[in-house]
């Protein structure tokens, strides 16, 4: 069944008017008619059935029915990723959403070739991926900041940071294992195509909140490394730990 | 440094003539000239330095120098994957190569929409990914066979099969952990976009060599599931277990 993220409060009997892109998708692309059912979620109230009660090309209206699932927050996991090339960055946003991150922090590092990107477009990719992957919330994509400034602002509440270090280190899974059962926030840092600069690596390794780890003996592209690291984290500390 | 896979035997002083595509790449694209050095590997003899000794647009010749790395075989890991849509299948081949599989078995399942694919093209993608990821061998891409026939031919030497079951199951990492330190061959099975048919799932779950596992509560696309499962396997049983 089609799932849509909407900003509206969701409760039985509430009317919802999707935005114009969503209306076009529902009516022109998916050919929904009055009486069709879809699912709605807003990141706060869980997942609800909703029935199409008006179906124009320009305007659709939905009426919220029964709640399907109670809200459940995603694990407090941040993917911090350097601005890699656009196609690969878009893949990373899509995959990180499927893998259940709470937020994506875009970063500028010394070897990053860009200093800005279309964050609204990346947020739209995250929203679409959240709709398709069955999540009850959408990860927030945060404007790019410089790596050094991001590290400067680290505090006790920011939890721990796993750095995927292509120059080697202890195995990622072994570094995560001692933290099983605790509910600290975590971030996972993925560098740019050219890797981190040696000074950046020195600083990262020296920070008390950092675990610099290895993802094996082969060179991984940024998108592969991001998916691998997020999967290991979910399997060791996140919501893949319990059977589903 | 550029790395090329060649079929030739590699030993100090041996001449190597790359094929015409490789010559075009080396001379026309990468602008190598006489005296330039590259790395060669053939899946048997390790990695060797080689010097360009003839550099024509149509023909290049290399002379093998010193060995850089001794040969090391990849773990005995097979990715068995249904014929999903072409772009996603190509991503899976590239990523599986980065993640160190020994072979990729293409499969036709009941809900697979295709019964053939361009295996030579997929093999070329695997070769290019192997060159870039620093592997010493290239995974073999095997012609598609029907899932039922592939399972019929299973025997003791084929080892164990991890099935990513989107209908739920025990956590993948917990299912792998008891096998740490053993050197059994493993395969990882990824189904088509529409999932496995219920009869296929029943058979898979009943086979004594199968571990049907969950990759968490969200719906993963085939490429995400493949990368996640291969990463967990490498981290739990493969060559990510030791520091690098």
Image (cartoon, coloured by chain):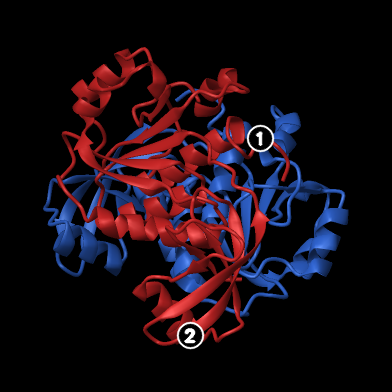
Chain colours: A red, B blue
| Residue placed under numbered mark 2 in the picture | A55
| Sequence order check, earlier mark of 2 and 1 | 2
SS under mark 2: strand
- Label 2: how many residues lie within 10 Å, few (<14), some (14-19) or many (20+)? many
Q: Is residue A1 left or right of residue B45?
A: right
Mark 1 belongs to which subunit?
A: A
Mark 2 belongs to which subunit?
A: A
- Residue B229 image offset from top left, x and y in percent: 60, 46
SS under mark 1: loop
Write down the quadrant of residue A18 in the picture. Answer: bottom left
The residue at the far front in this view is A13
Write down the quadrant of residue A57 in the picture. Answer: bottom left
| Figure disc tally | 2
| Residue placed under numbered mark 1 in the picture | A241
- Residue B149 image offset from top left, x and y in percent: 78, 69
Residue nearer the viewer, B221 or B131: B221
- Residue A157 image offset from top left, x and y in percent: 40, 20
Q: Is residue B159 left or right of residue B137?
A: right
> Distance of mark 2 from mark 1, alpha carbons?
43 Å
Residue at 46 percent across and 84 percent down: it is A27
- Residue B183 image offset from top left, x and y in percent: 70, 34
Residue at 15 percent across and 67 percent down: it is B57
Q: Is residue B226 left or right of residue A163?
A: right
Quadrant the N terminus of chain B occupies: top left
């Amino acid at each position: 069944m089609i799932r849509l993220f909407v900003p509206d409060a969701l409760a039985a009997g509430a009317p919802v008017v999707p935005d114009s892109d969503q209306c076009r998708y529902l009516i022109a692309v998916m050919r929904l008619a009055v009486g069709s059912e879809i699912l709605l979620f807003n990141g706060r109230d869980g997942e609800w059935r909703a029935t199409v009660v008006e179906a124009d090309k320009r305007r659709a209206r939905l009426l919220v029915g029964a709640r399907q699932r109670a809200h459940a927050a995603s694990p407090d996991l941040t993917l911090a990723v350097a601005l890699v090339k656009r196609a690969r960055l878009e893949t990373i946003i899509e995959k990180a959403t499927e893998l259940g991150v709470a937020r994506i922090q875009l970063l500028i590092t010394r070897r990053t070739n860009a200093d800005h990107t279309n964050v609204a477009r990346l947020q739209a990719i995250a929203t679409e991926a959240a709709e398709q992957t069955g999540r009850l919330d959408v990860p927030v994509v945060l404007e790019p900041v410089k790596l050094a400034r991001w590290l400067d602002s680290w505090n006790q509440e920011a939890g721990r940071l796993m750095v995927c270090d292509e120059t080697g280190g202890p195995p990622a899974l072994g570094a995560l294992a001692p933290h099983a059962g605790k509910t600290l926030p975590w971030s996972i840092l993925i560098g740019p195509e050219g890797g981190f600069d040696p000074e950046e690596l020195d600083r990262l390794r020296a920070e008390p909140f950092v675990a610099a780890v290895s993802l094996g003996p082969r060179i991984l592209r940024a998108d592969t490394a991001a998916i691998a690291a997020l999967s290991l984290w979910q399997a060791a500390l996140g919501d893949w730990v319990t059977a589903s």
